[in-house]
Image (cartoon, rainbow, N blue to C red):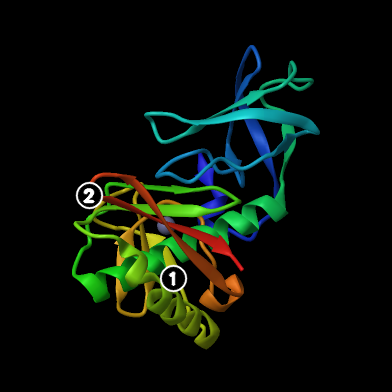
Amino acid sequence: MRKLFWEDPYLKECVAKVESINGNKVRLSQSVFFAFSGGQESDSGTINEIPVKEARKEADGGITYVLESAPTFAPGDEVKITIDWEKRYRIMKLHTAAHMVWFLFEKKTGVKKLIGSNVTNEKSRIDYEFPESVSSILPELEKEVNELISKGMEIKTYDDPQNPGRRWWEMGEFKCHCGGTHLKNLKEIGALKLKRKNTGKGKERIEITLA
Ligand SMILES: [Zn+2]
């Protein structure tokens, strides 16, 4: 399946050929509709106007779309896939933001390893094993994050030639593997708010929301 959300994460709809149907489950030749992976939640949207209940990433790298009602189309047909763009764009902002906070947190504390992360259209979060409260670090981190956003930085995502099916995310000196959907430029985020949450002894969570 061709992943148009990698080639151009700003695509809001596309046409695809139906490859197979099994009950309400549909496989397509290509799609703009992201399926939950790497902590990023699935898109919402429709296939030929029928709402998608669930988008499931399969072991073969493809995606199965489970529709809310029986498909009104057949294998071989062309269908139109539309995503809820407002939701997706918020996810792109909050996902890109999570990378940036992660990198700047490492610069500040030397701690890189995440023990958890999650991105929705409401907020993103990154979790650390950290011996003390991060609340003393957060105001300065938030200031640095927002300064970087207002400066604006170009973000590149591209296939990893050494690892087929994996993607690189790159922004200036920062680089990591990631198969999510991202902004082209940091300044699209606008501004962020950071909040601490204690999730257990020695565990610290940074919650990121759009300001
Ligand atoms: Zn990412």
Q: Name the residue under label 1.
A: 156
Q: Answer yes or no: do the residues labelled 1 and 2 have beta carbons within 8 Å?
A: no
- Residue at 49% of width from left, 54% of height from top? 124
Q: Report helix, strand or loop for mark 2.
A: loop
- Residue at 58% of width from left, 36% of height from top? 29
Tell me if residue 94 can be seen: yes
Up/down of 49 relative to 196, above or below? above
Residue 188, by quadrant, is bottom right
Find residue 36 and name its label: none
Up/down of 31 relative to 135, above or below? above
Tell me if residue 153 can be seen: no
- Residue at 71% of width from left, 21% of height from top? 68
Q: Report helix, strand or loop for mark 1.
A: strand
Q: Where is residue 112 in the image (x, y as percent from the top left)?
A: 22, 62
Left or right position of 125 against 51 = left
Find residue 202 and name its label: 2
Q: Nearer the viewer, residue 96 or 209?
A: 209
The amino acid marked with disc number 2 is: Gly
The amino acid marked with disc number 1 is: Lys
Q: Nearer the viewer, residue 94 or 22?
A: 94
Q: Where is residue 174 in the image (x, y as percent from the top left)?
A: 31, 73
User: What crowding class fits label 2: few (fewer than 14 Cα within 10 Å), some (14-19), or many (20 or more)?
Assistant: few
Residue 132, by quadrant, is bottom left
Quarter of the displayed picture in which ligand 1 can be seen: bottom left
Work out which residue is located at the far bottom of the displayed protein and give it. 151
Work out which residue is located at the far top of the displayed protein and give it. 23
Q: Which of marks 1 and 2 is nearer the N terminus?
A: 1
Q: Position of residue 96 (x, y in %)?
A: 48, 64
Mark closer to the observer (1, 2): 2
User: What crowding class fits label 1: few (fewer than 14 Cα within 10 Å), some (14-19), or many (20 or more)?
Assistant: some
